[in-house]
């Protein structure tokens, strides 16, 4: 059993804690956060260690970043990567990962997540419960899937994208993948039927950009 530190102490960190304890691969050494409020709420057994920037990590210490905010997750990753820590993947034992797929470091797959064939996933990916990614998809760095995201085949999701609960992403074509641009946010329950430009907030079925005019149109 290897030692591991958890950055974050809120709700998602409590979930990740359960997955780690269930898999019995790691011994949790402690938690980092900006304060102890969330840490005390969840009654963790391992100690609170303060802010990760004030801690003297050893070379090759294991760290998991249990924070949903992709921008913050990436900042912490880059800061600690420079210090030589490791970012192991945390895969719950109920998840399925195709042997033909490639997943970079620092990723968290929650229970009942499915990663099918010929998929490439970047670093710091998080997929919450009951999400799936179908064949021939490319997922960038720091992407977050909320629970029950359905990403069908031939889809490209660029860096720093947040996909809300229950979103359905329609299948693209092998010669023309459906693409969700960098930094976009897809609101919960949306159905994405066509490519999304970078930096857009989308909502609805079919998904359209979140603007005052579009909100009035959908009422």
Image: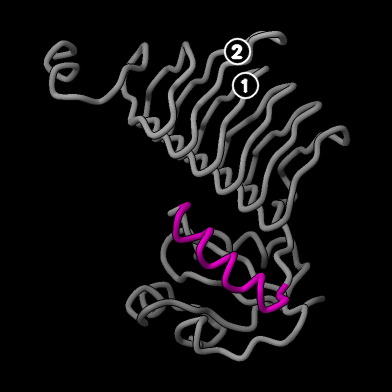
The residue labelled by disc 1 is 155
- Which quarter of the picture shows residue 178? top right
**Dot label at residue 171:** 2
At x 50%, y 89%, the residue is 54
Residue 15 shown in magenta = no
Does 213 sit above or below residue 62? above
Magenta-drawn segment: 70-85
Left or right placement of residue 182 versus residue 211 in this view: right
- Across and down, in percent, residue 22 comes to 69, 62
Residue 74 shown in magenta = yes
At x 75%, y 45%, the residue is 103
How crowded pointer 2 is (Cα within 10 Å; few <14, some 14-19, many 20+) is rated as many
Q: Along the line of sight, which residue is nearer the eye, 209 or 133?
A: 209
Left or right placement of residue 102 versus residue 83 in this view: right
Q: Along the line of sight, which residue is nearer the eye, 106 or 211?
A: 211
At x 45%, y 17%, the residue is 192
Does 117 sit above or below residue 172? below
How crowded pointer 1 is (Cα within 10 Å; few <14, some 14-19, many 20+) is rated as many
- Across and down, in percent, residue 84 comes to 72, 76
| Label 2, label 1: how far apart the Cα atoms are | 7 Å
Give the residue at the far right of this rendering: 99
Does 102 sit above or below residue 42? above
């Amino acid at each position: 059993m290897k030692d591991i530190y958890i950055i974050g102490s809120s709700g998602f960190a409590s979930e990740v804690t359960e997955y780690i304890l269930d898999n019995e691969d790691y011994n949790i050494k402690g938690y980092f956060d900006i304060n102890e409020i969330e840490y005390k709420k969840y009654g963790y057994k391992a100690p609170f260690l303060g802010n990760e920037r004030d801690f003297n990590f050893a070379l090759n210490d294991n760290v998991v970043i249990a924070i949903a905010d992709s921008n913050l997750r990436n900042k912490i990753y880059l800061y600690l990567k420079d210090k030589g820590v490791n970012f192991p993947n945390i895969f719950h034992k109920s998840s399925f990962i195709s042997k033909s797929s490639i997943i970079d470091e620092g990723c968290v797959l929650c229970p009942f997540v499915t990663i099918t064939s010929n998929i490439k996933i970047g670093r710091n990916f998080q997929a919450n419960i009951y999400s799936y990614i179908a064949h021939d998809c490319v997922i960038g760095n720091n992407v977050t899937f909320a629970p029950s995201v359905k990403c069908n085949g031939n889809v490209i999701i660029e860096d720093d994208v947040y996909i809300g609960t229950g979103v359905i992403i329609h299948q693209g074509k092998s010669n023309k993948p459906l693409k969700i641009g960098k930094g976009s946010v897809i609101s919960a329950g949306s159905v994405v039927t066509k490519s999304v430009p970078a930096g857009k907030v989308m909502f609805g079925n079919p998904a359209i950009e979140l603007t005052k005019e579009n909100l009035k149109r959908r009422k």
